[in-house]
Image (cartoon, rainbow, N blue to C red):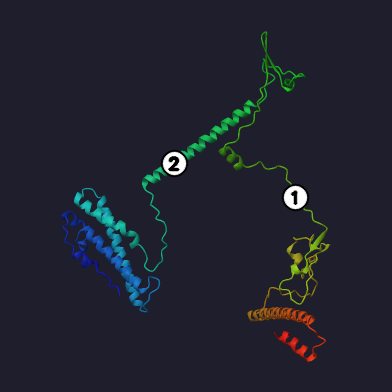
Amino acid sequence: MTEITNSAAMIGDCTHTVSSSLVVKLPSSQNACPICVITSQMAAVRAAQNHFLTRGGVFMSSSGDVKKHVIATRYWKKTKIALANTIIKFENLLNKPGLPVEDMARLSEALEIWDDQKIFLGRVPGLRYVRGPNTPVPTEEDRERARVFMNWVRNTMKREMILSAIREKARSVSARPPDKDLPGWQLVEPKSFPNPISSAILAHTRDGNHTFINLPHNHHDHPPPKSVFQALRTLIAPKPSNPIPYRKHVRISPFATISSEHLSTANPSPFKSLSRTCATAPHSIHTTAEHKRHKYAYFRRHPTYAPGAWASVEGSRKANTSFYHAKPWAVEMYVGRELKREERERKVAVQLGRDGREWMVALGEVRKMDVQGMRLERLVVWLSGFGDG
């Protein structure tokens, strides 16, 4: 069995020199160098973990003695708390100004030893850990790069959306037809010419004694494709709602299709052949019956009660399909009886099918034999042997 190590004895064995300025700041129980203090406390935590592993772990102890398990748990907690307090103490000493360089070097070395083993010392004994990929911890430089990158993406998206809006506005202004009231513009109807230019629109612009004719080029002005941000804005923008309310009309067929028996029967009997033909019939009165009435109209004893399409005949008995108000033992007995009946029918059907196949084989063999020359007793014995097989 693993013995629990005493960390105080290991601290007392320290032979390193400690400066007087650091001895004053450390507690009296840690009258040693920071490296030996950290090493001894880490060894105590590892010893407590190994002690738990020999007993089966924290959650399941191999020994039946509960008192020993409680003592081991308390010691494990005590060593971890002592190590955590020492780490906090050393980190606070490093942050204080005026500490000698030698003391800072020893404290930093002790904290580096702890940093190398902190993952293993923080594990719970007896708990299975999955060995996954070593994910590095992001540093401050990595966080700063991520922040700068996100700001650049945000500014780029904002600038692209502004440019898309400006291009869309300029395109709509350029596509607007010229104003007839502006001076210097005159719209002329196109004339028919035998050449291909006859289908073009001629815009005559007169400037003094000169006449300018603008001929269109063989160029199709297709709208440029939308950018990703513009398409995304088009998808996100809510569509204007129709002010005119649209009333939904429901149309149903005058006849309903009724499924066949083999589709609507659960756990059918193997001795009953179910129909596979579908039938059509007019809808029942429940299809167009009212589904909402005043609550007193459903109460039979109320004077305003009026039987509707969903009402059953007075005095009729409902089928207890959900075993309502039934005892648990009665439900189990009924369900067990039904299951036994289904199993018995299934076995009988399987046996009949097997016997039928055997008799068919026997009949085929009899047809091949000379039945007339064989005695009747031998034939009966031979056929009975097939039936028993």
Residue that lies at the very extreme toward the top in this rendered image: 209
Left or right: residue 9 compared with residue 68? left
In the structure shown, which secondary structural element does the residue marked by tag 2 occupy? helix
Residue 171 lies, with reference to residue 63, above or below; the image says: above
Count the marks.
2
Residue that lies at the very extreme toward the bottom in this rendered image: 377
Q: Which mark is residue 82?
A: none
Task: Assess disc 2: are there few (<14), some (14-19) or many (≥20) residues with their C-alpha within 10 Å of its C-alpha.
Answer: few
Q: Amino acid at mark 1?
A: Lys
For the point 77% across and 51% down, the residue is 249
Please tell me which of labels 2 and 1 falls first in the chain.
Answer: 2
Left or right: residue 46 compared with residue 326? left
The answer to which of 314 and 77 lies nearer the viewer is 77
Separation of residues labelled 2 and 1 (CA atoms): 51 Å
Q: Position of residue 177 (x, y in %)?
A: 67, 24
On the rendered image, what quadrant is the C terminus found in? bottom right
- The image quarter in which residue 277 lies: bottom right
On the rendered image, what quadrant is the N terminus found in? bottom left
Q: Position of residue 385 (x, y in %)?
A: 72, 87
**From the viewer's perspective, is the residue at label 2 or at label 1 nearer?**
2
Residue 194 lies, with reference to residue 261, above or below; the image says: above
Residue identifier under label 1: 248
Residue identifier under label 2: 149
Asked if residue 299 shows in the view, the reply is no
- The image quarter in which residue 9 lies: bottom left
The answer to which of 224 and 240 lies nearer the viewer is 224
Q: Position of residue 261 (x, y in %)?
A: 77, 69
- The image quarter in which residue 16 lies: bottom left
